[in-house]
Amino acid sequence: MKQPELGKKVSDLRKAKGLTQEELVEKCNLNVRTIQRIEAGEVSPRTYTIKAIFEALEYHWEKDSEMDSQSAEKPSPLLYISIGAAIIYFFLSILEIGMEQEFLGGEVSFSLIGYTLIKAGTYFFYILFLLGWLKLTLRFPNRILTIALWVMVGANVIWFIIDMIALFTDVFSIGDYYMIKVSSFGFIFAFLGFGYLGYKKEFSSMATIMGVLLILAGVLMFTGIGVFLALIPWTLAEIVQIGLMIYLIQKIGSKKTPDFTV
């Protein structure tokens, strides 16, 4: 049984027994906050937590468990597409950074169309990667990360439009706003880092390392004093992001569900 159905089931059974949340936690040796978040559908508890709650409510939970295992959830194709998009984005972004620096320097050795295609590809594949993470947050709830991901998607769309205007009109040039763009992305990368830290309890060192790397890269970019230095933690964070996405895909459909209680 998945959320939010699980939370509603627990709430209905508790109320049918005439129990308050405080009385239920005394029976199953949990804390009130855990019960509140489960009933609200905010977390997906481990099997032993579900067992303890249902046994306290005298409900035969094994039948639901068997039904869930027979109809295991399959990862969305978007997640696999996102992994491929992340790898393509990684190489395109490095190429784009080099081309952008050359473009800003005024000595261009490539065509405008080629530069535009590289830039468009970088934005497109990164947004695909972000959409994959948004899909994962539906299965592994993380409110801060969800907000940060949507902010990053919006920023990419906006800056892509601005870049296209700068490349094909005389309204302004990329150099006029380059540092503003870098600083804005730095701020959002740091925001994403804090979001990923929300997974540190469930996924331990992997989420912690990624969160810290993104925050470090974001701070370096936001201040403008370490833009190229930021590429080091950013590159490492990108690799860990792909690794964590693969790990979470493997978790989907497994019989054991991660505990998202705090």
Image (cartoon, rainbow, N blue to C red):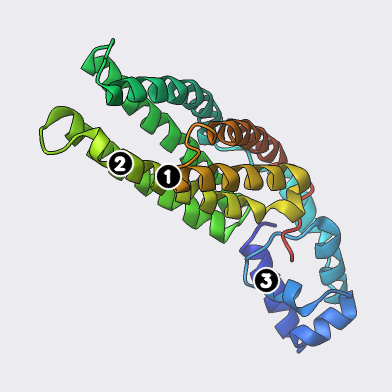
Could you say which is closer to the camera, residue 66 or residue 25? 25
Q: Mark 1 to mark 2: distance in Å? A: 10 Å
| Image: 135 above or below 239 | below
Could you say which is closer to the camera, residue 6 or residue 190? 190
Picture quarter with the C terminus: bottom right
User: Which of pointers 3 and 1 lies earlier in the amino acid sequence?
Assistant: 3
Please state the horizontal and vertical placement of residue 154, each as a whole percent of the image.
Answer: 36, 48
C-beta proximity under 8 Å, tags 3 and 1 = no
User: Which of pointers 1 and 2 lies earlier in the amino acid sequence?
Assistant: 2
Q: What label sits on residue 153 in the rendered view?
A: none
Q: Which residue is drawn at the image coordinates 28% and 15% (left, top)? A: 114
Q: Mark 3 to mark 1: distance in Å? A: 33 Å
* Circle 2: residue type: Trp
The residue at the far front in this view is 225
Quarter of image, res 195: bottom right
Please state the horizontal and vertical placement of residue 27, each as a whole percent of the image.
Answer: 89, 80
Badge 1 marks a residue whose secondary structure is helix
Residue occupied by mark 2: 159
Q: Residues within 10 Å of mark 2 (few under 14, many from 20)?
A: some
Residue occupied by mark 3: 37
Could you say which is closer to the camera, residue 185 or residue 109? 109
Q: Residues within 10 Å of mark 3 (few under 14, many from 20)?
A: some
* Circle 1: residue type: Phe
Q: Which residue is drawn at the image coordinates 87% and 68% (left, top)? A: 52
Residue occupied by mark 1: 185
